[in-house]
Structures are given as C-alpha cells and as structure tokens.
Image (spheres, rainbow, N blue to C red):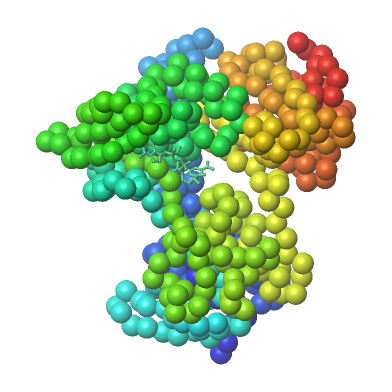
Amino acid sequence: MAYDVVIIGSGPGGYVCAIKAAQLGLKTAVVEKNATFGGTCLNIGCIPSKALLHASEMFAEAGHSFDTLGVEVTPKLNLKKMMAHKDATVAANVNGVAFLFKKNKIDSFHGTGKVVAAGRVSVTGEDGKIEEIETRNIVIATGSDVAGIPGVKVDIDEKVIVSSTGALSLAKVPGHLVVVGGGVIGLELGSVWARLGAKVTVVEFLDTILGGMDGEVSKQFHRMLSKQGFEFKLGAKVTGVAKAKKGATVTFEPVKGGAAETIEADAVLIATGRSAYSDSLGLKEAGVEVDERGRVKTDGHLRTNVPGIYAIGDVIAGPMLAHKAEDEGVAVAESIAGQAGHVNYDVIPSVVYTSPEIASVGKTEEELKKAGIDYKAGKFPFTANGRARAMLHTDGFVKILADKASDRVLGVHIVGFGAGEMIHEAAVLMEFGGSSEDLARTCHAHPTMSEAVKEAALATFFKPIHI
Ligand code: NAI
C-alpha cells in the first residue's frame, strides 16, 4: 500500500508537516530513528533548555530581586529536582506528539530512514532489519547536528567537554564553565549555569556576541551579561580543547594575531554552530543535490531537484529555527495536497531566551544600511515603562525600523523581560505590511510592557509620550 507522503524525521518540521498532511486527507507516515518523536527541539534542544532557563531564572531571582520586593527567602538549589522538571517537560511534549500522530492516524516507522529513489524510502530498524515503504512524496526533515569547532579535533564526552546535549544534564554546577561560541546556544546554556553559580567565560571568534543580530542589541546585551558576571574573550579563535587531569583546558589566540592563551575549566561547552544532517540518507545515490555545506538544495517551493522529494527545516538553507521548520512543513503539506503553500521568510521572528530576553523580526539596522534603504528608527527604554518598574524588569529597550518614505515597518528589535512574547505584535503588523503609525495608533492596555512597543512606534513616526 503506497502512502501519499512519507516524512523522514519527526522534529518540529517533520511532525508538523505530518499532522498538516493528515489533516488535509493525505495518507501519511513518519520515519524516526530515535525512541521518541520531536527531534532535537523537543528532546535535547528548545524544550529542555527552556525548562532549565525558567527554573534557573526563578532561582536567581529568588536570590537577588525577591528581597527588594519584600520577599525574604534563602534559595537552596536542588539540581536533581530541577533536572526532573526538565525531564518531565520533555516527556509531556514528546508524548504529546505521539498522541497527535495517533489522533491524526499517522503511521510511524522506528528506524533510520533512507531515500532509495523517488517514491521509495527504506527503514533500517535497530535489529538491522530493512523495510521498504512506497510513497508518492518524500519529505526530508532530518534536521541538524552539532558542528564542532571547524578545524579543531575535540573529544566531546558529554560530561566534561559537552555539546548542547550534555550541557542540559551536567551532574553538578561546574566551578568554571568555558563556553566556546558566543551564539544563541552558548549564551542561553551559559546563562543557566551562571545563574546556578558557575563562573562563565565565553570565548568568541567575532568581535561581538550574537553575530548577525542588530548591532545595538548585541552591544547592549554584551554589557548586560558582563554585569551578570559573564566574562568575554572576543575576537578570540579557539584552537584547542583538551581533557586535563581535573576538567579541561581551552586554548585560543587573538583573531588579529598574537600570543595564544590557555584557560582551565571544570566543564567546556562547545557551541560553535550546527550542520545539516544529510549524510547517510542515500541522497547521492537518489540524485538529490546538496550544497557545499551538506544542505539539501530546494527551490522556492521546498522541492529538491528530484520530483516528488521535498526538504524542510535545518537540513536546508536558512535560519535553524524550529518555527521556520514548522512553517515549511505546513507549506509542503499544502503543496502536496494541491494548495498554495508559502513561507514568508521576511517575517520570521527569532528569540534568545536569556535574561533579559532578546527578540527580533525583520531587518537589522546594519542590513538596511547595506541594502541602501532609507529608514528611520524609533526607540523606547523599559526604564520609562511603569509595569517594568513595578516588576524590577527595566533592563532593555524596543527599537523599530521603518521605511523613511512609506513608514512601513521593516524590523523590530526588543531587549527586555518577555521580549519573546511581545515580538509577535510586530510580526503580525509586518505580515500585514503595517506602518509604525498603525502600531502607534493601536490601543495598548495599561500598564503592560507592550506599551513600550507602542511608544517606540510613536517615536518612529512622530514623538513618544512618556519620555
Ligand atoms: P551560532 O552560529 O549561533 O553561534 C556559534 C558561534 O561560535 C558564532 O558566534 C561563531 O563566531 C563562534 N565560533 C565558531 N568557531 C569558533 C572558534 N574556533 N572559536 C571561537 N568561536 C567560534 O551557533 P549555536 O549557538 O551553536 O546555535 C546553533 C543553531 O541553533 C543556530 O542556528 C541557532 O540559531 C539555533 N538555536 C536557536 C535558538 C533559539 O532560537 N532560541 C536556541 C538554540 C539554538
């Protein structure tokens, strides 16, 4: 019996694609090599890290800001219990996906999927048995894997030298955690352990953390994290990570040239990016083209060069974000069902779940300058927001960038408590092609942090009221 669509991989891209396809009446199956569904995001990424980020933030707040609020407590860390909360969160989410598969009558095959040719997928089970499935369409949604440090051999044992996976399960709080890479993973997981008491040193190749983010955002955030006790070695290229008798050592040298330095660590987190997981999928034999970085090549409709084979998520080009993969999954399911599936890559929000949070959607100031677009910027700080003051969350600001002539909003950047929730009004506005005046004239409830978004919009098109 042939399927309409077989999806290889059950991360946010794959499982959402499967559910959407089934909802549209397609006979759907998913192939997954892990014991549980949900991929990196649900098992060893977004979800467990958010459980630890929330719990560690509560711990840090109890130790720092509660006293000012008149709540006197002496927090005591129970790391085992915190990890149990993380594990329970993961279990609830992956079981949720299994339930949704059942509810939508999606078949699942446990084993390693391989593209034999258009219309044929093989599944190798743990016992080595191979099963072949016939299908009209194949969706490659195999995600990404830890990239490691380019050109440096590192023995990741997930105990002392860890990737994001091991950093979610350290047995105790390390005295000194060295993070290689000042990107999203390094700063989120670095924050977890810093809040729980570790001294955290981040070694980053670029002269800035969160490269690619709006320059003003990364500069201010660098200052905030330094105030939280983070130490940064910027413009520093890591050339070696080695296990030592006790812990490990990290060696780095200035990118601009100069003497190398070696620091000692109780644990080292390697967070230097992820790479597409496209090996051993049989793509070469099936004639599916990949680019120089191993990412499956797709066209504007997420089709590969082989008819009937699509690819979505981290395994193709673009930001490695769960929600981008989800939207691509929906678009592919719709295309296969004969509808007009589409993803608007201009409006994909991104959130860094640190404290404060960072959220952005659309263009950065640097991108607008580079593209020669005439723009205006409006800013509003949370220090001037009543709700932020009441909650002791005055760190950060909202910045809106709009086209100078049309006032159409082109980018919004928020540093602040709850930024990851607030960004979505900007995303909706931009999806509808709205202007800063549209946003500024939309009534915002008082007192809310979101009023700062309205004030930044006021600042963009005319003048803010409260500053
Ligand atoms: P990243 O690309 O964000 O950051 C890696 C950093 O490592 C870069 O700043 C790079 O300059 C630096 N680096 C590379 N080689 C180096 C060397 N030899 N020495 C020193 N520094 C070096 O990658 P990251 O943080 O590993 O995240 C992987 C992917 O997962 C990203 O695409 C990210 O967007 C995604 N992700 C998204 C999250 C979110 O949306 N909240 C959370 C976690 C991951």
Residue situated in front as seen by the camera: 464 or 43: 464
In the image as oriented, which residue stretches furthest toward the front? 257
Is 200 on the left-hand or right-hand side of 443?
A: left
Residue 129 seen anywhere in this rendered image of the structure = yes
Residue situated in front as seen by the camera: 137 or 300: 300
Residue 438 seen anywhere in this rendered image of the structure = no
Q: Is residue 408 above or below residue 329?
A: above
Looking at the rendering, the quadrant in which ligand 1 lies is: top left
- The C terminus, quarter of image: top right
Residue shown at 50%/62% (left/top)? 291
Residue shown at 51%/9% (left/top)? 68
Residue 186, percent across and down? 41, 36
Give residue 111's quadrant in the image: bottom left
Residue shown at 43%/50% (left/top)? 274
Give residue 230's quadrant in the image: top left
Residue 448, percent across and down? 72, 24
Residue 286, percent across and down? 48, 79
In the image as oriented, which residue stretches furthest toward the left? 245
Residue situated in front as seen by the camera: 225 or 169: 225
Is 115 on the left-hand or right-hand side of 251?
A: right
Residue 64, percent across and down? 45, 15
- The N terminus, quarter of image: bottom right
Residue shown at 83%/16% (left/top)? 463
